[in-house]
């Protein structure tokens, strides 16, 4: 089980493209607080930027949200970030995790690419309800 | 939005990207640079990205598109100073950047531009 560290989580509404900057800032701050190295910090921030952009591309007009917090488990520390929206949901989650698959004419790297950049990525989506992507990056 | 410095030295344009770029800024830089390449009739363009802390797939795609456009305008392009952490991240993300001419820093980038110009002159 992953326990949230007692200190407060940071959260941000993702509603416009300008919020991408805020998402990156929050994740960078959390990465530094956890003590992630520069490469891991960059990977986490980049993954977050991709996932936030997914919300803006696919869940237009819905209430997208980022919650980021410190996590500790079995003596290791890390950052957990949850990206949630109440958009249309993903019909084929398996395809969405495949490189090059896109329904928006993009490179189709957002989800599969983000998965490669973090230690854990859990995708939960329900058509007509929304999508939640949870990522974790551990300090090595 | 931060002003993007575009400096012209002879026939070379030097574009410096830095900070945390949002999508609109990246796209406006692309337009500014293309306009300036045409106006200055530059034969070489150096894009210095050493000040970028993060390049995600969107920014990478616009950078690649900008390089293609600059080439179409008759200028050679070198992208210099990609931070190691950014390079590692881009490779793992899977963004295709292999077709860009890159160099470690501005000095090597200028040498690369000179070589690209010479190759181009030989072919012509």
Image (cartoon, helix red, strand yellow):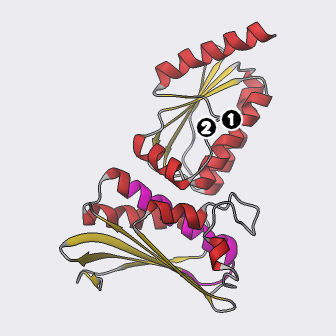
- State the SS at label 1: helix
Q: Is residue A44 magenta?
A: yes
Residue A82, percent from left and from top:
45, 78
Residue A107 seen in render: yes
Tell me the residue that label 1 is attached to. Answer: B67
Q: Which mark is residue A136?
A: none
Tell me the residue that label 2 is attached to. Answer: B98
Q: Which residues are magenta?
A: A41-64
Chain holding disc 2 = B
Residue occupying the point 41% across, 46% down: B85
Residue A120, percent from left and from top:
42, 71
- State the SS at label 2: loop
Rounded to the nearest whole Å, what is the CA distance between mark 2 and mark 1? 12 Å
Rendering quarter of residue A127: bottom right
Residue occupying the point 74% across, 14% down: B120
Residue A45, percent from left and from top:
44, 60
């Amino acid at each position: 089980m992953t326990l949230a560290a007692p200190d407060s989580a940071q959260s941000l509404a993702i509603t416009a493209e300008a919020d991408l900057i805020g998402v990156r800032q929050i994740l960078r701050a959390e990465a530094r607080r956890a003590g992630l190295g520069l490469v891991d910090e960059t990977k986490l921030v980049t993954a977050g930027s991709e996932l936030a952009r997914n919300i803006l591309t696919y869940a237009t007009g819905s209430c997208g949200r980022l919650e980021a917090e410190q996590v500790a488990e079995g003596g290791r520390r890390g950052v957990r970030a949850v990206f949630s929206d109440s958009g249309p949901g993903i019909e084929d989650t398996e395809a969405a995790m495949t490189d090059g698959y896109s329904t928006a004419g993009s490179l189709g790297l957002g989800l599969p690419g983000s998965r490669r950049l973090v230690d854990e990525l859990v995708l939960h989506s329900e058509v007509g309800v929304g999508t939640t992507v949870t990522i974790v990056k551990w300090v090595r | 939005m931060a002003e993007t410095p575009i400096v012209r030295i002879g026939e070379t344009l030097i574009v410096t990207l830095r900070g945390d770029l949002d999508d609109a800024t990246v796209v406006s830089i692309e337009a500014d640079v293309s306009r300036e390449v045409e106006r200055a009739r530059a034969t070489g363009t150096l894009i210095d990205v050493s000040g970028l802390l993060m390049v995600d797939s969107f920014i990478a795609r616009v950078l690649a598109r900008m390089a293609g456009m600059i080439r179409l305008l008759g200028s050679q392009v070198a992208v210099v100073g990609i931070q190691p952490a950014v390079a590692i991240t881009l490779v793992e993300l899977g963004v295709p950047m292999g077709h860009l001419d890159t160099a470690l820093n501005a000095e090597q980038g200028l040498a690369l531009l000179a070589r690209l110009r010479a190759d181009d002159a030989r072919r012509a």
